[in-house]
Structures are given as structure tokens and as C-alpha cells.
Image (cartoon, coloured by chain):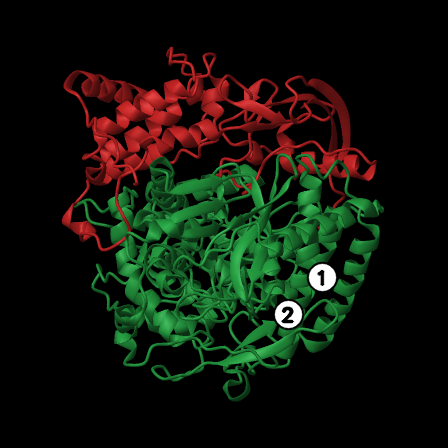
Chain colours: A red, B green
């Protein structure tokens, strides 16, 4: 009990970019006496405390839940989105870094994601892809008894594998082409598997794929880097399924009406 | 004194909600687009309310400090959502859910609201399934259930250990649909910093554009706060690092009464504190207590590894003390029992402040694969953080601040004491009394957002037809000036204490004196200490950077300023509630066995605090709780 706490020190090369400026640069900082139990983001908290204490502007970076589910954190660490291992940045632990290591930290900036400040990027294009059709059109109110539509257990599990996506954008940051195919296909795949998603299935895939293209994401070239960097282990099989549905929608025609606009 | 008319409909409990809906004012579909409704927050309550109101035709303005509505902290809810579907035919019913919730809350909630919550619960599941929420199914394709603490039925619906995420994505997707339709206007990265009240009515909000630092305003005929609880005042909590109390606190200072601020839930199963660097405590879902057995060694200062401790030297304290509910006692009971075990010297881990939660027997009985399919992601999460595998050795857990039962006072329509201002989800106080049961917060958020507020909001809006107040009203300019003044003051102090260091010290004080165990002396001491910290903040805080820039240090400072005031009120409320009930354990009031001792004669009420200005102390008003259908009994889980 109460044995002395083990600590480590690291050198950080952090991308700093002022707001409203498209140019930035790497700045080096040293952080000492980091407890080994600290997470990577807690190490950045320590750095920011140091900076504030010495009168400097803290490094802007985003995080919220710090337990790997909200998808807010978004750092490229030593060249890898969310760093080494399939987890989110907030789940990276300092015990996995070597004492004295130099760590390079960059934003998820790539193609459709623009850097806002330091390590903060604009991922709103992902919201707009969902907005284009990533839902089932139902209003709030009385609905049919859910057990009247049985769904096979493995189908639900498959759908949940896809809808486990946290919208962090690591797939985009990892892709040499900056494609958002894994993100988009995960939502399409989730809803296409369930009976509730069938009505709008082909209209949805058409609209979402077009929204993805319009946002300036690159196209999928089967690098599969997205799958390798996804903290939720989402499979590229959903991209295959998305492409199949998209071909079906373009050949056979999907629902081309589009939603009824408000007057 | 405040006029606290909860507007509970008359008639039998079972018929109140239906008869209420038959008699309230409505806004017709052609007029709804002429109303602007402001919704702050997009967790389960905010997203479900905003999408429902927009689908009805209202023009909805949605404000969030996140970059995307999908980030709200409801996303982190793990275990499940309650609904009295009675699919297992194990004796569940609306009345049973009502009874469990009231008993779980130690008879400190309003009966009519709780009954309505139970009535609405089944519709929530129907709604979410229709949206495509992939709830767990059995082999035959029917919905599966599990059990949570404080109940004797299986009524919890779940999606592995990520139920909150799936429910929130359902609500978020419905919200994005309305954005696409043009009926919802999203204001991401916009943090509400004040409420605008004109002639006693809420007419809009002041917010800070978090990218430019610009202070702006938005006007509407109703303002809905869905901004969650204030548990992050404790610094170490299971809340997200940005969770804060500023929206509800600023509304409070503009006249919305704050009820039961000291009712804060301490969740029994969290990863223990390991040091000062820690930015948050990670919750391990209560669902784990379905199969995990909680124990400590019978010997003080035990040094053997858990696997080497034979069965008869293990103290399964929950199973022994509460044989009927065993490991599934409610959260307040389980948390206190863990604290007592550790205070008595039986705790484990490097600090001596942890207990074991053991899956050895469950794995032997059900097989590792079954356990993995039920809890796999939770086991993985634990291993990632601690480096230990719960398949090999027991979890080490300890209680942590998790949820606020207290919040803004609301009436049956979910309207606060300011007409036109509504509070939903964790931000209000209405349904959980002095302790919330597991899997009931998701239920309440979605009941409020999908079913209750969309049907009650018209009651207050209808009389306002064409009575609009725009942001050109002088009250808006005044409120903007107030906010700018506050920000400039914080920026100009340039002292030597960082906002984070003050927040951590506030948190420690609250945890030690207004946490699982409270007494009058400590609470008074905590109030004095918070007053000192408040002094320190306003004389010596140090914020770097510029106010006209993205500035996370400033964001934190503004939140800490409000946490200090919330924390003080929490302690005062705890001090003046001179009884024990639910989470609120006053050491002066306990049974011989160390259980809570309520005082229904004096304290069968909600304490409703009224802000009376900077210079005048808060006033404590009360709303009496009428026990018409359930006579309060001594809460026993033995």
C-alpha cells in the first residue's frame, strides 16, 4: 500500500494552429512526472495546466465522455488516428508509452475535415451525411407492438455491430483517399438489416452516398485502413453491402421522392 | 413564499394523464410554425423533444456546446432502459413500476409524475424499435430483458452495454431528419450562458459562439432546458468532462426554483480513484450486478490475491445483509455498504478503497462465452483502463458520483417556476425522489422528450399566439451586457489559481462532506470552505488566451464559477434536510443497523430553493408530497 507512484516523462510535438488561419506548425513541449496510471488525455491536461500556469494559451483539443463512446476525441498520434491499438484517443493509457518518448500529435485534419484550431477539426460533414437520410421516418407517438415483428438474434447483432459507430471520423483520417465510406456504410448497413429500415432502404443509400460525395470525401479504394483504425471494429463488409444496395438503387430506382418538405 | 402549484390533475391516479390531455390548450397544426421553441441540449431528453416538436411543426432552435448533437453524455449510458411490458410474465405492471420507483426514491417524489412515467414507459420501447434501435433479442426474435437493482422483475431492455448510445442515435437521427426538413436549426458549439426573461416569461437565451467568442442571443416563445445534471461539480464523477450546471444555474438565478439540490446519486460500481491526475471516473454498468458477486475479505488488511482467498473467508456483504435483493439492492444502499466496508478497513486495492465484484462463479456456471456475450464490452473497457482482466480476477470497484435526482422544479407540464421555461430529463427534479433506480434515467428522458413535453407545451404556448418578443427587446441587450461583464471580469483577474485547481478542490470538499455520508458539522464546514474558494476564484483565478477565440480555459472557468454556487446550495440543502432519505444519509439519523431513517412528519416535501439576488440568502420553500396511493413504508431490501 501507498508505494511511491511511478511516473514517466515525454516530449510532445504538437500541431498548433491559430483560429481562422490555415497555417500552423509543430511546437515542442516537455511533460514530466506523468503518473503511469494517467490516460493520454490526462497527460495533455497536465500539459495544459502547465501552460496556463505559465501564462500561455492552452492547447485546444476535444474530448468529452473519456470512456470511448461519445466520439469527440480525435487526435492523430505518431501518424495513427487514435494512436496505436483499436481504441479511441481517450482510452490510450500512458503506461503503454516509453519513458522519454517523443510523441507527435496532430489533428484529424484531412480533405473534408478542416482544422479549426490546434487539434480541433470540423466534422460536421458527418452530421450532414446522416441528415441526408440516415434515419427511419417515424414521428413520436403510438407505434405497433415490437414483438409483432420478430427479428432474428444474429440479424440484430449484425445491425448493432454497424450502429456501434461513434462518428469519430478515424476512418476518414486513416484513409489515404479521405473517404467516409465506412462511416456512411455503417449507418446504411444498420438500417438495411432491420425490418423497420426497409421502406426507405434504397432511397436512403442513394441520398447518403450522394451526400458523402458532395461533402468532398474521397472515394473508397479498398485500402481497408478505415477498418484497421476503427475503435469500434466496424467491418468493411458494410461498404460492400452499401455498394450492392447503391447499384440496386441506381439500376432499379430507389425512392426518388425525397422527404416531404415543410411548407 | 413562492407559488408552487404543481397543477396535478384531479381524479384517480390512473386517469390523471389522459384527463389532463383532454383538457389542456392546444396549438393547431397551421399555427405551430409561427412559434419558435428553443431547446438547449441534445441528450436523450433534448434530442427527443426537439425532434418531436419539430415533427409537429414548431420551429425549433437547438443549442449545443458539442460539435455534434450525437456527443451528448446520454450516449455513455450502458445498462438499459426500463419499461413495464411484462414480457416475462413475472408480475410486472404499471403499478409495480410506479411502486418500485417510489420506493426506490424513498418516497420523496411526486406520485402523479411517477405514475405517468410508468404508464409511458411501454410506448418508449415501441417508439425506439420503430426507429431501428437494435435492442437485444432472444432466439425466437422476441425482445430480451434483464434485471436491475431494487426490483424483483426483469423489465430492462438493452443493447449490449451501450443502450444509451443506441437510444441516443435513434433520437439524433430523428433530429437530423428534422434538420433536413428545415424545421430544426442547429447551433453547434454554442454554449448557453444566460436566460432572458421579459415580464416574467422566458423569452430567449444568451449564448457564446465557442469558435469566435461572440456573445449572441436567440428569442423564442418557449425555452426548454435539457442540459443534464450538475454532478460534475464534484470534479471526479462519471459525467463527461464538459458536463456542467451553467444553463440550469443561470435559469435559477433568473427565477427558476431549484429543488432538492443535495439529492445526488453515488453509483456503486465505478473504477476507483487512482490519483490526482484523474479527469473522470468510469462507470461499470449496474447490469454487472446481475451476475457479479460483491465481496471483501473477512480479514482486515488482507494481502493474498483474491483467487487465493477461500470461500469462507470472503464476506459477500450484500448477499448477507440483504438476502432478498442480494447484489441487486438499489444504488444508494450498495454504495453505502461499500463505503462502510472500506471505512472499517476491509477494502482492497492500493488505496484500500475498493471492493471486489467477482464473476468467477458466473463464469463457472454459465461459461465464459455467455458472460462475454452479455458484458464483453464492459470487461474490455475495464481491462483497457486498469490493465487487469475481469475474466481472470475480480473487478475492483468503488462508488462515484453519477446522477442528480435534484434539479429545476417543474410542474405536471414540466414547466419551471418561470412561465415558458421547461426543464426535462436529468435537468428537472420530478421523478426519482431521493434515489433513482438503474435504467430509469433513460426512461425518464425519453418519456419527457417523446411523449410528455410535446403534448404539454401547447398548453402554455397557445395563449401567446402572435405575441412575440424579438432579440431587439432591451432585455436581450441587458443580458448580453451582463454576460460580457462576467466574462471580462474573469479574464481580467489574471491571478495565480487555474480554474482546474479550484474545481478539484471544490470537488474534494463536496465528495468528503456532501457525498455518501453527511453530518451538520461537516456540511457547515464545507459551506465555509466553498465561500473561501469562491473568494479565491473571483480574486485570483487565472485564465489565459483571449475571450474572442476558442478558449477552453475560459469555458471551464465560467462553469467552475457556477459549480461553486451550485455546490454551496447543495450543502445548504443537505444541512437543512435534517433527516436521512435515499441517497441523503445524515449520520445523525440512522437505525441501529445503520440504515437511513426518514422523518415523514417533518420532511415529506421537496425543498424548493428560491434565488433572491446576490446579496440575499436563498429561501427554502417546500412542496408537500401527498401520499394518496402509497403509504410510505420503511424501505427494506432485506
Image location of residue B636, percent across then percent down: 43, 77
Q: Secondary structure at mark 2?
A: loop
Q: Secondary structure at mark 1?
A: helix
Report the Cα–Cα distance between label 1 and label 2: 23 Å
- Foreground label between 1 and 2: 2
Please tell me whether residue B345 is drawn above or below residue B184 in the rendered image. below
Please tell me whether residue B65 is drawn above or below residue B84 in the rendered image. above
User: Tag on residue B509?
Assistant: 1
Letter of the chain that mark 2 sits on in the rendering: B
Q: Residue at x 78, y 68 (%)?
A: B528
**Of label 1 and label 2, which has the lower sequence position?**
1
Q: Is residue A192 left or right of residue A28?
A: left
Looking at the rendered structure, whether the residues under marks 1 and 2 are on a common chain is answered as yes
Numbered-mark total: 2
Image location of residue A248, percent across then percent down: 19, 19
User: Tag on residue A136?
Assistant: none
Image location of residue B342, percent across then percent down: 62, 62
Location of mark 2 (residue): B611
- Rendering quarter of residue B555: top right
User: Which of B421/A101 is in front?
Assistant: B421
Q: Is residue B185 visible?
A: yes
Amino acid at each position: 500500500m501507498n508505494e511511491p507512484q511511478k511516473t514517466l516523462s515525454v516530449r510532445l510535438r504538437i500541431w498548433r494552429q491559430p483560429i481562422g488561419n490555415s497555417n500552423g506548425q509543430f511546437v515542442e513541449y516537455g511533460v514530466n512526472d506523468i503518473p503511469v496510471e494517467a490516460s493520454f488525455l490526462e497527460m495533455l491536461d497536465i500539459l495544459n495546466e502547465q501552460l496556463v500556469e505559465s501564462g500561455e494559451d492552452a492547447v485546444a483539443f476535444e474530448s468529452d465522455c473519456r470512456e470511448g463512446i461519445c466520439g469527440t476525441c480525435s487526435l492523430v498520434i505518431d501518424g495513427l488516428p487514435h494512436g496505436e491499438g483499436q481504441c479511441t484517443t481517450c482510452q490510450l493509457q500512458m503506461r503503454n508509452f516509453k519513458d522519454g518518448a517523443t510523441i507527435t500529435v496532430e489533428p484529424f485534419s484531412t480533405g473534408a475535415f478542416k482544422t479549426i484550431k490546434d487539434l480541433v477539426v470540423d466534422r460536421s460533414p458527418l452530421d450532414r451525411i446522416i441528415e441526408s437520410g440516415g434515419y427511419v421516418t417515424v414521428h413520436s407517438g403510438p407505434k405497433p407492438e415490437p414483438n409483432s415483428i420478430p427479428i432474428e438474434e444474429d440479424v440484430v447483432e449484425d445491425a448493432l455491430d454497424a450502429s456501434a459507430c461513434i462518428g469519430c471520423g478515424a476512418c476518414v483520417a486513416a484513409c489515404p483517399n479521405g473517404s467516409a465510406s465506412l462511416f456512411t456504410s455503417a449507418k446504411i448497413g444498420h438500417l438495411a438489416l432491420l425490418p423497420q429500415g426497409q421502406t426507405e432502404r434504397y432511397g436512403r443509400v442513394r441520398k447518403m452516398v450522394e451526400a458523402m460525395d458532395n461533402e468532398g470525401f474521397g472515394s473508397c479504394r479498398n485500402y481497408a485502413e478505415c477498418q484497421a483504425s476503427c475503435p469500434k471494429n466496424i467491418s468493411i463488409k458494410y461498404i460492400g453491402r452499401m455498394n450492392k444496395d447503391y447499384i440496386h438503387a441506381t439500376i432499379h430506382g430507389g425512392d426518388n421522392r425525397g422527404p416531404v418538405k415543410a411548407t | 413564499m413562492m407559488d408552487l402549484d404543481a397543477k396535478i390533475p384531479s381524479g384517480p391516479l390512473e386517469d390523471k394523464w389522459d384527463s389532463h390531455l383532454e383538457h389542456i390548450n392546444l396549438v393547431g397544426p397551421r399555427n405551430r410554425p409561427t412559434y419558435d421553441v428553443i431547446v438547449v441540449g441534445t441528450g436523450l431528453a433534448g434530442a427527443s423533444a426537439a425532434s418531436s416538436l419539430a415533427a409537429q411543426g414548431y420551429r425549433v432552435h437547438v443549442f449545443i456546446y458539442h460539435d455534434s448533437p450525437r456527443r451528448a453524455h446520454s450516449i455513455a449510458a450502458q445498462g438499459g432502459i426500463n419499461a413495464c411490458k411484462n414480457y416475462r410474465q413475472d408480475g410486472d405492471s404499471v403499478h409495480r413500476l410506479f411502486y418500485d420507483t417510489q420506493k426506490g426514491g424513498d418516497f420523496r417524489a411526486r406520485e402523479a409524475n411517477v405514475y405517468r412515467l410508468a404508464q409511458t414507459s411501454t410506448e418508449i420501447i415501441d417508439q425506439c424499435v420503430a426507429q431501428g434501435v437494435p435492442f437485444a433479442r432472444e432466439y425466437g426474435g422476441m425482445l430480451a430483458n434483464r434485471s436491475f437493482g431494487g426490483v424483483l422483475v426483469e423489465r430492462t431492455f438493452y443493447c449490449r452495454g451501450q443502450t444509451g448510445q443506441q437510444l441516443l442515435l435513434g433520437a439524433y437521427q430523428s433530429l437530423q431528419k428534422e434538420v433536413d426538413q428545415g424545421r430544426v436549426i442547429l447551433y453547434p458549439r454554442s454554449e448557453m450562458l444566460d436566460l432572458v426573461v421579459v415580464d416574467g416569461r422566458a423569452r430567449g437565451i444568451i449564448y457564446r459562439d465557442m469558435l469566435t467568442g461572440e456573445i449572441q442571443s436567440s428569442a423564442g416563445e418557449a425555452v426548454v432546458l435539457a442540459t443534464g445534471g450538475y454532478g460534475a461539480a464534484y470534479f471526479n464523477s462519471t459525467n463527461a468532462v464538459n458536463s456542467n450546471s451553467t444553463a440550469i444555474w443561470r435559469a435559477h438565478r433568473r427565477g427558476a426554483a431549484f429543488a432538492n439540490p443535495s439529492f445526488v446519486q453515488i453509483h456503486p460500481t465505478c473504477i476507483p480513484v487512482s490519483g490526482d491526475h484523474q479527469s473522470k471516473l468510469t462507470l461499470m454498468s449496474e447490469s454487472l450486478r446481475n451476475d457479479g458477486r460483491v465481496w471483501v475479505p473477512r480479514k482486515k488488511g488482507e494481502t493474498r490475491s483474491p483467487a487465493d482467498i477461500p470461500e469462507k473467508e470472503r464476506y459477500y456483504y450484500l448477499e448477507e445483509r440483504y438476502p432478498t435483493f442480494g447484489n441487486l439492492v438499489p444504488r444508494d444502499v450498495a454504495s453505502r455498504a461499500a463505503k462502510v466496508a472500506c471505512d472499517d478497513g476491509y477494502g482492497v486495492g492500493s488505496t484500500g478503497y475498493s471492493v471486489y465484484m467477482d464473476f468467477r462463479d458466473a463464469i463457472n456456471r454459465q461459461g465464459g462465452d455467455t458472460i462475454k456475450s452479455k458484458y464483453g464490452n464492459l470487461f474490455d473497457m475495464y481491462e483497457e483502463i486498469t490493465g487487469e482482466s475481469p475474466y481472470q480476477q475480480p473487478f475492483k470497484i468503488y462508488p462515484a458520483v453519477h446522477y442528480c435526482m435534484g434539479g429545476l422544479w417543474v410542474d405536471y407540464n414540466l414547466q419551471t417556476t418561470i412561465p415558458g421555461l421547461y426543464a426535462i430529463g436529468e435537468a428537472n427534479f420530478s421523478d426519482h425522489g431521493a434515489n433513482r433506480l438503474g435504467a430509469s434515467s433513460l426512461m425518464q428522458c425519453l418519456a419527457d422528450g417523446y411523449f410528455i413535453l410535446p403534448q404539454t407545451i401547447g398548453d402554455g404556448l397557445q395563449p401567446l399566439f402572435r405575441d412575440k418578443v424579438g432579440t431587439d427587446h432591451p432585455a436581450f441587450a441587458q443580458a448580453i451586457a451582463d454576460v460580457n461583464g462576467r466574462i471580462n471580469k474573469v479574464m481580467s483577474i489574471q491571478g495565480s489559481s487555474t480554474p482546474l485547481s479550484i474545481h478539484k478542490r471544490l470537488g474534494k470538499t463536496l465528495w468528503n462532506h456532501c457525498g455518501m455520508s453527511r453530518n451538520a458539522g461537516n456540511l457547515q464546514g464545507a459551506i465555509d470552505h466553498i465561500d473561501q474558494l469562491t473568494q479565491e476564484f473571483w480574486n485570483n483565478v487565472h485564465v489565459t488566451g483571449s475571450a474572442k477565440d476558442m478558449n477552453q480555459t475560459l469555458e471551464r472557468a465560467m462553469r467552475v464559477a457556477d459549480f461553486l454556487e451550485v455546490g454551496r446550495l447543495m450543502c445548504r440543502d443537505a444541512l437543512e434536510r435534517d433527516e436521512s432519505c435515499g441517497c441523503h444519509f445524515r449520520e445523525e439519523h440512522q437505525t441501529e443497523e445503520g440504515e437511513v431513517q426518514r422523518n415523514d412528519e417533518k420532511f415529506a416535501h421537496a425543498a424548493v430553493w428560491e434565488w433572491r439576488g446576490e446579496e440575499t440568502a436563498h429561501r427554502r420553500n417546500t412542496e408537500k408530497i401527498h401520499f394518496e396511493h402509497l403509504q410510505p413504508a420503511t424501505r427494506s431490501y432485506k
